[in-house]
Amino acid sequence: MEISRRRRFWRAPPGIGPLSAGGTRADPAGASPACPATTPPAPSAAASTQSPATATPGSPTTEAADPSTPPENRDTASPTNPATPPDSRATAVPGSPAATEPASPPRPSENPDTAPPANPATPSKSRATPPGGPAVAPPEEPAATAPARSAGAAPPEPGRGRHRRYRPGTGARPWTIQGQRRVDRDTGTRPAETRTDAATPEDHDPEDSDEPPRRRAALVALGVTAVVSAAALIAGLPDWSPQPAGPARTLTAAEADRLAAMRVTNQRDVRAGVRVTIGAGRSAAELVGWVDWARPLVYLSARGPDLGTEPGLVQATRSAVVVRPDPATASAPPPLVPPADRWRLREPPAGRGVAAVRDLLLGLTADRTDATPGAARWVGRDTVDGSPVDILQTPLPASPASPATGTPANSGPAGEAAAGRSLRLWLDQDARLHRLRGWLPDDTPVTVDLARSDRPTLRPVDALGGPPGLPRALADAEADRLARLPSRLRAAGGAKLALTAPVGPAANLRATGWVSWAAGSAYLAVGEADTPGRRTLLRWHSGRVARVEMPADGGAAEAPAAPPLPPPAGLAWPAARPPGDNLDRLLETALRLGGTAVPAGSAVRLRGDQIAGRAVDVVEVPADRAALRYWIDRDGVLRRLELPAGGVWAQLDLTPGRVPALPVAA
């Protein structure tokens, strides 16, 4: 008996027919037309008592072959005989090599004397007859053997130590599994037919195909390839630089003209958004914001190491840098309307950090075209924000002279080093700069990306002079309010004052106190914003000043507490002296306003503004050493007095009202 390992069911060898009642094998009815049919054996006496006319409907003996089915595709199982065992054999094809093979000994369950009668209610199961081969009838499940096997188990297969799951009602086993036709082991040929019923997961044997290992190998290979590609891409990004389209060459006439007009184009565009990266990797510092080439002004949000100052908001001109410290500053553009408090004057080291970035950005403007450097080279092409650009390598020309000092903004060793260094410029066809890459004077790499369409109007903080205006001559009402200012101050008698004076990197002064125009005196408590534990008492009378230090007893660094009245006993006041510094000068100017008229002939109105919810006119009046600014409301009351000091402005805010008796210098 031959066992098919692929199909998991046993097949009768060719030449063995079904067992008759006498124990002999005979050819079944309905043999293939290609082979001569043999005479079926005579039915037994038990079977002859039942005629076809009286057979039970639905029983196997009443089933007839479908006349529409070709003979070679019909099931050829013999009629069920109660005395015949359920495992019948198909008739061998005469002349086939397998016809001479000896019959296998009957299995114990195939003994005709002990085989139980067939269950009429159980339909016979049949297999499709392969072309050119014998028909095979699968064994029926006898009802009497139910206790011996479970309902879902197939008969044990000879030579196999396991059972195949039997699924009732699924029909014959398909000839195809996953689109592959099987080869008939008896004939060595593939069957001509293909059954349409699809294979189920239970029919598929993982041992029949090596497809899963191949699929796993392919998936592993694809995964390894993806990981390696991603790692190579990430590793190459930090050091990426555009490859030149060809060898570096000298500039064409058109490229030289665009390079010469680059800084004039920046001046004409007025402003641009910037993102500056100093250094590389985790140690890089980022500065995001805007540059205003017309004012000029840089307004940035800075964070990272080696800035030369604290992280936070930064505003810088050519001569001053003010910082609002904030360790939690995000890498995002700063607010368009800057906060009004906590600004500090700083002096970062030249040639590095914020100072170097300020010089680099403000050095990208000029009011006339530049001469093209002879060392300028074209090195490649690129695309930035959808715009094609040329990459030019050239030294940065020296910045124009500052109107205040008459010297270039990048003068000095650090500025000269920055001007002479070679930079790479991404320049479009309209001479607009989109990217700059090079080195700072301290040999730190720097990359500047410019957003040419991001051009909001910037508002400088009060320490840098406030927002720009449109200066004009005073109107009649404005000139009248300025002329009446001394009489109004004397009528008010005095005012409470608050002073903000960034007079140096280590002298960001804050003061609170009173001024009396009637008595010609002032009394203040002055503190340093960065050292809140100390404060100085200052008293002014008759043009002389006395100061004494004392421990701080409350109040914030931005708004120190009012000076004690009367002054603490035991303080050793030094001898009064004439005013000397910017703070003394600001107080002297404020006290003088009560008795001296302001010259209105040369005064100009800079702009309109607001302070403490009141609309004011900002009037600038030239003075001997520097211009003064008067903030006068529509009632003619002075609300603020501003005095320039070393590139920044000090503010003295006044609130007219009753003033207590002030101490005077001895």
Image (cartoon, rainbow, N blue to C red):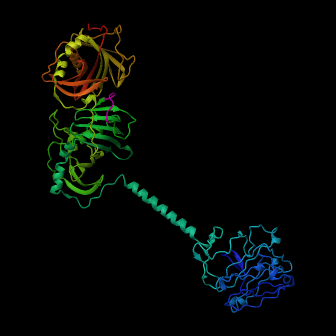
Tell me where residue 288 sits by quadrant.
top left
Q: Quadrant of residue 134?
A: bottom right
Q: Magenta span covers which residues?
A: 336-343
Quadrant the C terminus occupies: top left
Residue 471 drawn above or below residue 441: above
Q: Give whichever of 488, 317 is nearer the camera.
A: 488
Q: Name the foreground residue: 284 vs 117.
A: 117
Task: Give the left or right position of residue 473, taking residue 546 as reference.
Answer: left
Q: Is residue 138 above or below residue 93?
A: above
Up the image or down, 459 lies above or below 234; here it is above
Position of residue 3 in the picture relative to residue 19 (left or right) = left
Quadrant of the image for the N terminus?
A: bottom right
The percent coordinates of residue 86 (x first, y second) are 78, 78
Question: Eyeballing the image, is 256 above or below 346?
Answer: below
* Residue 538 appears anywhere in the view: no
Q: Nearer the viewer, residue 378 or 92?
A: 92
Residue 148 horizontal/vertical position (percent): 81, 69
Magenta-colored stretch includes residue 339: yes
Judge left or right: residue 480 versus residue 240. left
Quarter residue 534 falls in: top left
